[in-house]
Amino acid sequence: MRILVATDAWRPQVNGVVRTYERLGEEAQKLGAELEFLTPAEFHTVAAPTYPEIRLSIPGFGHVRRRFAEIQPEAVHIATEGPVGWMARSHCLSRRIAFTTSFHTRFPEYLSPRFGVPEAWTYRVMRAFHNAGAGVMVATASLAAELNGRGFDRILPWTRGVDTDVFAPRPVRRFGDGPVFITVGRVAIEKNITAFLDLKLPGRKVVVGDGPQLAEMRARYPDVVFTGKRTGEDLAECYASADVFVLPSRTETFGIVQLEAMASGLPVAAFPVTGPIDVITPGVTGALGEDLGAAALACLAIDKAIVRAKALDFSWENCARLFIGNIETAQFARLGRRVPARRKLLGRRTALG
């Protein structure tokens, strides 16, 4: 199967969406599927407002038509609701090409505090975007229930994976002796970073990541270690050098950083919101609560070996199987037929139940 994936999130961006599709391309190939990507690298771009590191593509519908003709995809998946996603959607609708989508980012909750756009307006646009497709893939049961309540149709389960070879316990202590509390992600208002930085915790706090608020946060919190962007082995050593991972965000749709932390042996402290409530088992792999400080302190008593063992349940192979299976299911459902048994790639035992 040759699948065209249209995405606005791509290198050099560093985030969970990019990591997901990079690894998905590798794993899908092992299962006999070839992924071709349509990305901002193929278009003229401009910097996103307040996010200069994110490039927005200037529409080029002629290029989209040529790429579709060149690739001749058997299936189309639209990963993001940015310019590339909208161009691919328009092309598919005009030519009656079936496509699936995925819901990765809570843009309504991002746009509201930054630009004052009512969340209901943005959800209306996103609902129209996704409901035009044959199915929308979501990562967690709680997000599926929420989107269903907001009128999103044909919701499909698609969990995530983690590289447990790269992210693993290591004998390193970059930030000194413990306790070390760490968070990883964009340093931006929507990530609720100050909820972590304002906590009264023993030891040291570490923030790994770049973003529009990095300079401001460094100035406001001089006792916190801000490492900037880290990737690969460098990032893995940062995780392994800490004792507890704190996820202050309330707007995650999954939070791959949780899995990276768990694979590194770190229990996760988070608010009881979408993403953490689907991944974290309280008292076993972390702690959830509106008192984030108390949750972080409770994590110090959790067995790191058990946390690591639970992370091994999340494989990229299963992620790829679910993705391909969803595409097959959506395409056959659109034709009013069931997926033939010989085409089914896996049973659907997932985080969505």
Image (tube, rainbow, N blue to C red):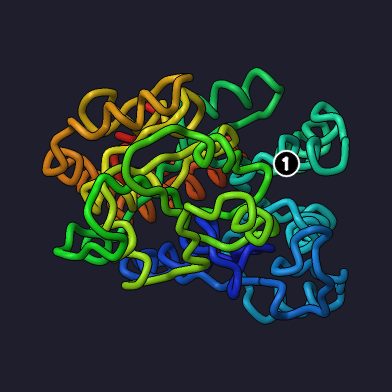
Residue type at mark 1? Tyr
Q: In the figure, residue 285 lies in which quadrant?
A: top left
Nearer to us in this view, 150 or 101: 150
Name, please, the residue furthest toward the front: 222
Q: Is residue 343 visible?
A: no
The residue pinned by badge 1 equals 110
Q: In the rendered view, does 298 fall on the left or right side of 124?
A: left
Badge 1 element: helix
Residue 54, position in %: x, y? 71, 66
Q: In the rendered view, does 243 fall on the left or right side of 321?
A: left
Residue 251, position in %: x, y? 60, 35
| Residue 66, placed above or below residue 117 | below
Residue 123, position in %: x, y? 77, 32
| Residue 23, placed above or below residue 122 | below
Q: In the figure, residue 347 lies in which quadrant?
A: top left
Residue displayed at 62% across by 22% down: 148
Q: Residues within 10 Å of mark 1 (few under 14, many from 20)?
A: some
Residue displayed at 73% across by 51% down: 81
Nearer to us in this view, 20 or 166: 166
Q: In the figure, residue 68 lies in which quadrant?
A: bottom right
Q: Is residue 70 visible?
A: yes
Residue 322, position in %: x, y? 39, 47
Nearer to us in this view, 193 or 205: 205
